[in-house]
């Protein structure tokens, strides 16, 4: 007799308990999409997800792990979640404030944070908050000079009337993109440090 895959075992156990995929997701602290992908077999199962599901369905971890070792991926350093944070921070391209808010919301709602995840979240928030501060000061200075008719010093007047004016927001975007790309590929290529 052919043994069941971990995906089939989870699906069968969930149905025997009379749980919907949404019920299992809620009780295990996972997203519905994660449960759906696990049951379809389209996603490797993280150690956290496996532990949560085994507790809810009351299936010993050994029963899930031993026959299905090749299907299970334990992401001890949460590199996938950290990479998702960096990708989410790219929403600043749509609106600079989103680059700060989206990762902050993701970090706040994440249930199994470790120190590495928190460290990278803090780096993302600091770089975006600093960038927003400089961008806000730049826009505020323009507002003060144009609308409030406050005179600018001659050195700044040269910057705001020439092509150098565009360098300030371009530098903001360039620095954030480089920061995100470097950190994303560093995590992708090696263990999170």
Image: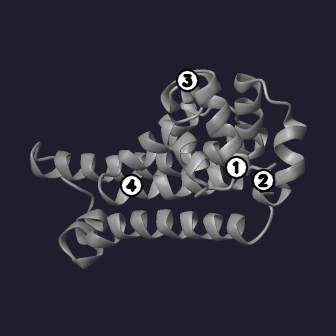
| Residue, disc 1 | 45
Q: Label 1: few (<14), some or many (≥20) within 10 Å? A: many
Tell me the element at label 1. Answer: loop
Given residues 21 and 118, the one toward you in this image is: 21
Identify the image quadrant of residue 101. Answer: top left
Given residues 8 and 187, the one toward you in this image is: 8
Alpha carbon separation for disc pair 1 and 4:
27 Å
Q: Is residue 151 in view from this perspective?
A: yes
Q: Is residue 123 above or below residue 104?
A: below
Q: Say whether marks 2 and 1 touch (CB < 8 Å).
A: yes
Q: Nearer the N terminus, badge 3 or badge 4?
A: 3
Alpha carbon separation for disc pair 3 and 2:
23 Å
Left/right placement of residue 44 relative to residue 141 reads: right
Left/right placement of residue 20 relative to residue 132 reads: right
| Residue, disc 4 | 91
Alpha carbon separation for disc pair 4 and 2:
31 Å
User: Which of labels 1 and 3 is toward the front?
Assistant: 3
Residue 34: horizontal and vertical position, in percent? 56, 43
Q: Say whether marks 3 and 4 touch (CB < 8 Å).
A: no
């Amino acid at each position: 007799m052919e043994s069941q895959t971990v995906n089939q075992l989870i699906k069968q156990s969930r149905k025997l308990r009379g749980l919907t995929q949404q019920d299992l997701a809620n009780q295990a602290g996972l997203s519905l999409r994660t449960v759906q992908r696990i049951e379809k077999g389209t996603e490797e199962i993280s150690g956290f997800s496996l532990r949560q599901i085994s507790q809810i369905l009351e299936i010993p971890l050994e029963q899930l792990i031993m026959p299905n070792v090749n299907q299970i991926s334990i992401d001890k350093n949460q590199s996938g979640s950290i990479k998702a944070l960096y990708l989410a921070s790219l929403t600043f391209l749509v609106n600079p404030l989103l680059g700060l808010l989206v990762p902050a919301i993701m970090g706040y709602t994440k249930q199994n944070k470790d120190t590495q995840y928190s460290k990278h979240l803090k780096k993302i928030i600091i770089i975006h908050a600093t960038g927003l501060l400089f961008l806000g000061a730049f826009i505020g200075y323009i507002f003060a000079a144009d609308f409030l008719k406050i005179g600018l010093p001659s050195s700044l007047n040269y910057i705001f009337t020439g092509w150098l004016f565009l360098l300030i927001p371009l530098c903001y975007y360039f620095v954030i993109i480089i920061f995100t790309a470097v950190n994303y590929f560093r995590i992708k290529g090696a263990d999170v440090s």
